[in-house]
């Protein structure tokens, strides 16, 4: 493609994006294609000769868009959102144009230094402890693996990196509501999934601190070595908030690495009224949250903080001769702060988003999403045929239709049918979880542009579909 064609098509593509954002509510939220449908639409073989851009765009519209689930649709209430925003999209375009591989300071000093500054900005916005150092990772899963590997090197006598595991069995603790990325990290770090101890939760689905302490004592008495505990600041199921301060005290008492997984809900720390609930975040050794979930920044962008930056770097640094640089001692070479060597320039989109929205607008949106969650929860709670299945500390509501006189199995089945019918309608998208063995519909009000009207419409649709499914029984 010649540069003049690039310019022309570039303008067209930006127009496409603006139209897409303008008309996004005309698309079904959840893609309706069947497995294999898109695969069969794509040419069997790559073209030998280059094709016209217009033809590629036509196929994009006809063959790709139907297979897209519209995460930026304001009636996307599924999973956790992966929000973007206009400034974030523009920054991603610039990032792709620069095409810089930001593994070291020298490979783009601006990327390294902007990343350091953006991590400082986020630290200030969330009032995280001053002494923490931040780095952008691709996902929370990677950050949690990084934390687990760092804990392994710090808390086990004799370096596992160089010598392999010494004799003994090493334990990691997390609540039974903890995210599966912790199970994955424990496996990948070589601890063995048998050594991930799941701690019981209370009626709020938050870890019970004395159960944690009991498990640690019991393990020590039986010759195990406790290494790390993970606290969830907002579980994935219901955004349950583990007792963050108390877990910190237990971690300190037994000398465990304390990792806080705040992947989705960490963004809410930007609000004073939420931040003030935590007095001892400084007891954590590492902390992760995802601006790519709930801070209007394109996937991927995960903010990872660590108290002891040297411990992190010691775990990962490995500099072959061809990567040695003059400035090593003065700068951050982020290849040493995690798993990958090659890194995208992710700080740019954060800079664009934070500057363009300003801290106040970000706060306002987050506050609004929480209010929408509470409004919806209140409607559910007041309705005689619906019930809440978990407390609603933030923007995530777990609930079900329960018209009475139904066995558990029947309740699960009808709620499952309600969910599929709603999602097939294309008008909204919500997902489910299981809490205390109960099938829960799960609505998250967190999409960038969600308004009260979208949540109201969702609630109307849910009520109508529930009655409809009941009558079909
Ligand atoms: C979403 C989520 C994760 C995983 O996030 P990725 O960035 O997709 O790896 C981890 N923990 C919690 C609590 C989450 O909600």
Image: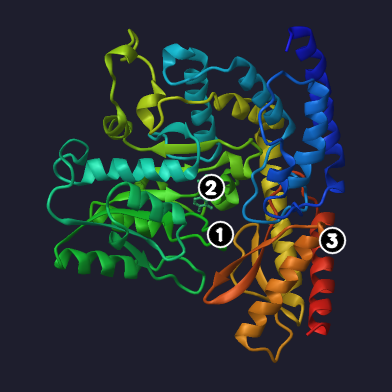
Label count reads 3
Q: Residues within 10 Å of mark 1 (few under 14, many from 20)?
A: many
Q: Earlier in the sequence, mark 2 or mark 3?
A: 2
Q: Residues within 10 Å of mark 3 (few under 14, many from 20)?
A: some
Badge 3 residue CB within 8 Å of ligand 1: no
In the rendered view, tell whether residue 450 sits above or below residue 10: below
Tell me the quarter of the image containing the N terminus: top right
Badge 2 residue CB within 8 Å of ligand 1: no
Q: Is residue 220 left or right of residue 106?
A: left
Q: Are marks 2 and 3 in contact (CB under 8 Å)?
A: no
> Where residue 424 sits in the image (x, y, percent)?
78, 61
Residue on which disc 3 sits: 457
> Where residue 160 sits in the image (x, y, percent)?
20, 41
Residue on which disc 1 sits: 239
Q: Which mark is residue 397?
A: none
Is residue 48 or residue 133 the one in the foreground? 48
Q: Name the residue: 76% across, 14% down.
A: 6
């Amino acid at each position: 493609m010649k540069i003049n064609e690039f310019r022309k098509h570039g303008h067209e593509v930006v127009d496409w994006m603006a139209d897409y954002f303008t008309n996004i509510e005309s698309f079904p939220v959840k893609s309706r294609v069947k497995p294999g449908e898109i695969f069969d639409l794509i040419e069997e073989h790559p073209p030998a000769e280059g094709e016209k851009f217009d033809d590629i765009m036509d196929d994009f519209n006809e063959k790709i868009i139907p297979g897209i689930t519209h995460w930026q649709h304001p009636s996307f209430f599924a999973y956790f959102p992966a929000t973007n925003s206009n400034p974030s999209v523009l920054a991603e375009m610039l990032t792709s144009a620069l095409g810089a591989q930001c593994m070291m300071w020298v490979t783009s000093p601006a990327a390294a230094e902007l990343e350091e500054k953006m991590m400082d900005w986020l630290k200030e916005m969330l009032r995280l402890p001053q002494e923490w150092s931040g780095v952008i990772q691709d996902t929370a899963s990677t950050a949690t693996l990084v934390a687990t590997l760092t804990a392994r090197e710090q808390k086990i006598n004799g370096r596992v990196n160089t010598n392999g595991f010494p004799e003994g069995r090493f334990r990691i603790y997390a609540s039974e509501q903890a995210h599966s990325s912790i199970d994955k990290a424990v496996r990948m770090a070589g601890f063995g999934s048998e050594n991930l101890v799941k701690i019981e939760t209370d009626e709020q689905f938050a870890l019970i601190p004395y159960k944690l302490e009991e498990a640690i004592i019991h393990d020590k008495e039986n010759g195990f070595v406790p290494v790390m505990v993970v606290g969830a600041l907002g579980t994935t199921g219901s955004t349950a908030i583990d007792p963050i301060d108390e877990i910190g005290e237990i971690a300190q008492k037994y000398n465990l690495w304390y990792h806080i997984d705040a992947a989705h809900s960490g963004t809410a720390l930007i609000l004073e009224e939420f931040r003030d609930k935590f007095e001892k975040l400084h007891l954590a050794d590492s902390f992760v949250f995802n601006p790519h979930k709930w801070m209007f920044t394109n996937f991927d962008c995960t903010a990872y903080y660590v108290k002891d930056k040297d411990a992190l770097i010691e775990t990962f640094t490995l500099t072959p001769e061809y990567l040695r640089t003059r400035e090593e001692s003065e700068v951050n070479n982020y290849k040493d702060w995690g798993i990958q060597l090659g890194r995208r320039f992710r700080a740019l989109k954060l800079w664009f988003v934070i500057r363009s929205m300003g801290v106040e607008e970000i706060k306002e949106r987050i506050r609004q999403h929480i209010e929408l969650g509470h409004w919806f929860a209140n409607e559910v709670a007041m309705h005689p045929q619906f019930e809440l299945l978990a407390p609603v500390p933030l923007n995530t509501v777990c609930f079900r239709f329960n018209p009475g006189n139904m066995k558990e199995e029947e309740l699960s089945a009808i709620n499952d049918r309600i969910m599929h019918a709603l999602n097939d309608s294309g008008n909204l998208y919500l997902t489910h979880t299981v809490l205390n063995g109960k099938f829960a519909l799960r609505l998250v009000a967190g999409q960038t542009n969600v308004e009260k009207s979208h949540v109201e419409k969702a609630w109307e649709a849910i009520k109508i579909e529930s009655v409809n499914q009941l009558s079909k029984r």
